[in-house]
Every structure is written in structure tokens, then in C-alpha cells.
Image (cartoon, helix red, strand yellow):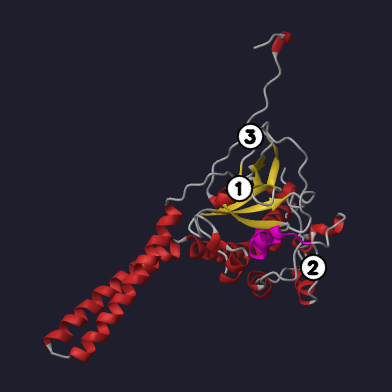
Amino acid sequence: MTQVMSASTLTTSGRSSMSSTCLLGRHFKLTKESHINLEHLHIARKRSLRVEAGWFFKGGEQESDATSERSESANEDILIFFFQLDLATQVQRALNLEEYEIAQQLRNKLTEVETEVIRQQEERRGSTSKSEAQDMAINILRLRADLQKAVQSENYGLAAELRDDISKLEAESLAASAKAQLYESAQYAFRLGQKVKHKKFDYRAVVCGMDPVCCESSSWKETAHVEELSRGSNQPFYQVLVDVYADPNILVAYVPEENLLAPDQPDLGRFDHPYISFLFYGMDAAGDFIPIKQLREKYNRPRHEVPFDPPEENGKDA
């Protein structure tokens, strides 16, 4: 059974973007029966408290260059995912206790959260870009019809303005179509749950999310020196959980594909992170983690695991 934690117990940072959680706190206040307490999360952020894995281990107060890839937005994305899991668990619990009114209230809140998350994912991952490109194509056709009328009426000033508008829309439509196409045809070198190693900073990590292109803010890209990457921002970027023993100052990093390596041999060593037990069932025979069903569905990825060899019968070798 997958373990689910309350959102109020999750590790977070005072520098996190508050947009998504504020949205949830503003629109999805929970009933007394709900044990998620988003107010605690808001209070912690307002007081600029930084709660990191580092204070469990010595040396946590010293930051390394690897922190340039630390992603508060990726961490926030995981927090909201936990929030969804927790709500779903509460719905089932209420049903088991035959508290149908409470179950319906929680189900309504879960539906609202899921609808908003889907909208944000579509906007981020290109579905919205595809519909925008279609709308722009229709507008271009209308503007071309207006342009033809303006030329026929010898209104050349208006015709010049319409040509400029058409050129601008065509460029925007091309960019939106390209973004949508990237998400539809994305190819990833690494899997959910796969253990990886950072080429530059040498820390161990586990993949817990992925985007076909960099979806971070301009300020984050500048801090992480994305423009200096050989493949730039138009390559897959991965949300990774960083082993707190390898670097206690980072919980979640957002790393370009070119900076990650898969181990040559199965990595069966200990891996510690506060999110592991909530995102994965456990390790397979290769040392990689098996993602829970909800995480696979979030990224539309298949289940993958290397099974352990079954015990030999009668003590004979295969």
C-alpha cells in the first residue's frame, strides 16, 4: 500500500513560488475532517523559514554550486501532487467509514484541485499551445480577408497595419505549434524512478519527473546558466530527488539531460530522501525505484522494473 503524507509535514523552502499553493489555500479550504493543514505551509513561508534536509546532517549550512539547479517550483509541484494523493486517501477513508457527506465534500475538492492541475499541466506541456496555434490560424485567415478588402479599397495605411499583424501572429503561431509538437514527440533518455548521477556535481539522484524542454523561469535559467549548455534549453529536463547524504542542501533539482548519467552497474546502495517512500513502491533488482501508479499516470509513462530472480527449485542451477 502506498503511504501518503499530510501536506503540512512536507519539507519546503521559504523561497518557493507561492502561486500554486496560495491558489489551493484560497480556493480549496478543507473541512475539519481533513488533516491537511495548508495554513501551516503558508505561515512557514511568510516567516521565510527554510526547512531543508540539510539540518539533519553536518555541513548542511554550506551551499555548493549544485544549488544553482535547485528548483523550488519543482518542489512545489511535488507538494501539490502529495496534496492530491492525500485528498484521494481521505475520500476513500470517509467511504469506508460510511461518512458519505464528508466523502462527497472531499471528492468535490479533489475534483477542483485536479481540474486546476490539469489546466496548468496542459498550459505547461503544450496542449494549450496547440489550441492557441489553431485559434491564431483562424485569426490569420480573417486578417488576410481584411487585408484583401483594404487593398481593394486602396486603404494602404490599414493594409500595412494588417500585414504587420499577420506577420506577428504567424510567428507566434509557429512558436506555439513547435512547443506543442515537442511535447507530443518527446524522447527521454531516463525513466521515472531511475537512479542517475550528475556529471558535474557528482551527486546521486532519482528521477521523479520530466519535461521535454526547460519550463523554469528566466531568472532560474540565468542562475543555472542554461544558455551555456551545449543543447540549450530545448532538451529534456528532469525533476530529480537528490540523495541527502550526497548533498544535504538540495531536495529537488531540475537538471538538463546532458548533465545526467546512468550508472554502469546496478546501484543497490542506500538512498535517502524524505519523498522516496511516497513516490515509489520500493527498489527493483537493478536498484532503481518503482514509481507509484499515480506518478506514472501524471507523466504518462509505462511501468518499468527489473524483477528479482525467482528462487531455484531443488537447488539446481538454471
Q: Are marks 3 and 2 in contact (CB under 8 Å)?
A: no
Q: Position of residue 45 (x, y in %)?
A: 76, 73
Q: CA distance from mark 2 to mark 1?
A: 27 Å
Q: Quadrant of residue 86?
A: bottom right
Whether the residues at callouts 2 and 1 have beta carbons within 8 Å, the answer is: no
> What percent of the width, then of the height, locates residue 260?
60, 47
Residue 264 tag number = 3
Residue type of the residue flagged with mark 1 = Leu
* Mark 3: amino acid: Asp
In the rendered image, the quadrant that contains the C terminus is top right
Disc on res. 105: none
Dot 3 or dot 2: first in sequence order is: 2
Label 2 belongs to which residue?
A: 50
**Residue 184 or 268: which is nearer the viewer?**
268
Q: Bounds of the magenta span? A: 63-84
The question of residue 82 being in magenta is answered with: yes
Amino acid bearing label 2: Arg
Whether residue 297 is visible here, answered yes or no, is yes
Secondary structure under the numbered disc 3 in the rendered image: loop
| Magenta highlight on residue 93 | no
> For this view, does 226 lie left or right of residue 309?
left
For image coordinates 76% across by 69% down, the residue present is: 41
Q: Quadrant of residue 6?
A: bottom right
Circle 1 residue:
260
Q: Secondary structure at mark 2?
A: loop
Closer to the chain start, of discs 2 and 1, is: 2
Q: Residue at x 15, y 85 (%)?
A: 151
Percent x, y of residue 53: 80, 57
Residue 130 vertical position relative to residue 291 in the rendered view, above or below:
below
Position of residue 8 in the picture relative to residue 123 (left or right) = right
Tell me the distance, in whole angstroms, between the alpha carbons under discs 3 and 2: 36 Å
